[in-house]
Image (cartoon, rainbow, N blue to C red):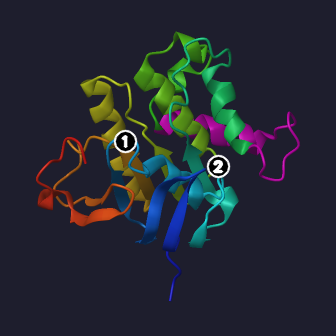
Amino acid sequence: MTEPALRIENLTLGYRDHVAVDDLSLVVERGEFVHIAGRNGSGKSSLAKAALGLIPIWSGTVALGVAKDRIGYLAQGEGQDPSFPATVFEVALAGRQNLGKIFPFYSKADRDAAWRALDEVGIADLSGRRVGELSGGQRRRALIARALARDPEFLILDEPLSGLDRESESGLMRLLDRFNRERGLTVMMTTHDLGLAGPEARVVALDGRILYDGPAAGREDRRHG
């Protein structure tokens, strides 16, 4: 039987004396698109970081069924700094780091992977532009291209829609839905707004613990998790 992309059991974690996530258990199957929803402070980002081993846990277990070099990660707030100096192509190419490569010695295969990723997210024509010159939605696509350049099996995206206008949000969601459907890419995305989630999308609503786990259509308040 195939291992799930992520299995969390009885997870408790926090910061100093504050409990962020309390006795939480969650399974993300391969090929799923899971929306982790909740208000600020509900434990969404802590859960995403714990899944990647980026923060210590107090108790419980976190097991990834996907090799870490096959995981693409977008951190909360990443790409929102307009002064970021790199070009779009350099950002995508950076996704090839830690894949047995020694920076900055990228191979032709690495460069080809970066070009393919930019083409997939629809911004290959912006490859020479500085990221700081782009719109918020374009910057977020550049970062998703960086993740895709790794040829990932699992995307973990922490508030990727935050700060975007509605048109950019919709475009990014269509892109992620397509990757999930057509490539079978597993996606776990944190969000405070379920307005763009399809009625059949799986939603896990958090407030330090799981309040709801099921289709988005079953949620009374889809705007704020």
Residue at horizontal 64%, vertical 26%? 89
Q: Is residue 187 a member of the stretch shown in magenta?
A: no
Residue at horizontal 41%, vertical 50%? 189
Residue at horizontal 14%, vertical 48%? 221
User: In the visual, does 68 lie left or right of 31?
Assistant: right
- First of labels 2, 1 by sequence position: 2
Task: Choose between 118 and 82: the one closer to the eye.
Answer: 82
Task: Choose between 38 and 170: the one closer to the eye.
Answer: 38
What distance separates the C-alpha of mark 2 from that of mark 1?
Answer: 17 Å
Question: Label 2: few (<14), some or many (≥20) within 10 Å?
Answer: many
User: In the visual, does 62 lie left or right of 97?
Assistant: left
What kind of element bears circle 2? Answer: loop
Image disc number at residue 175: 1
Task: Choose between 224 and 3: the one closer to the eye.
Answer: 224
Q: Position of residue 48 (x, y in %)?
A: 51, 53
Image disc number at residue 150: 2
Location of residue 89 with respect to 75 vertically, above or below: above
> Is residue 148 visible to the viewer in this orientation of the structure?
no
Amino acid beneath label 1: Leu
Which stretch did the figure color magenta? 97-120
Location of residue 220 with respect to 95 vertically, above or below: below
Amino acid beneath label 2: Arg
Q: Could you tell me how many numbered marks the image carries?
A: 2
> Is residue 220 visible to the viewer in this orientation of the structure?
yes
Q: Position of residue 207 (x, y in %)?
A: 34, 54
Q: Position of residue 208 (x, y in %)?
A: 39, 57
Q: Is residue 101 a member of the stretch shown in magenta?
A: yes
Mark 2 and mark 1 residues within 8 Å of each other at the beta carbon: no
Q: Residue furthest front?
A: 17
Query: To which quarter of the image does residue 93 belong?
Result: top right
Question: Label 1: few (<14), some or many (≥20) within 10 Å?
Answer: some
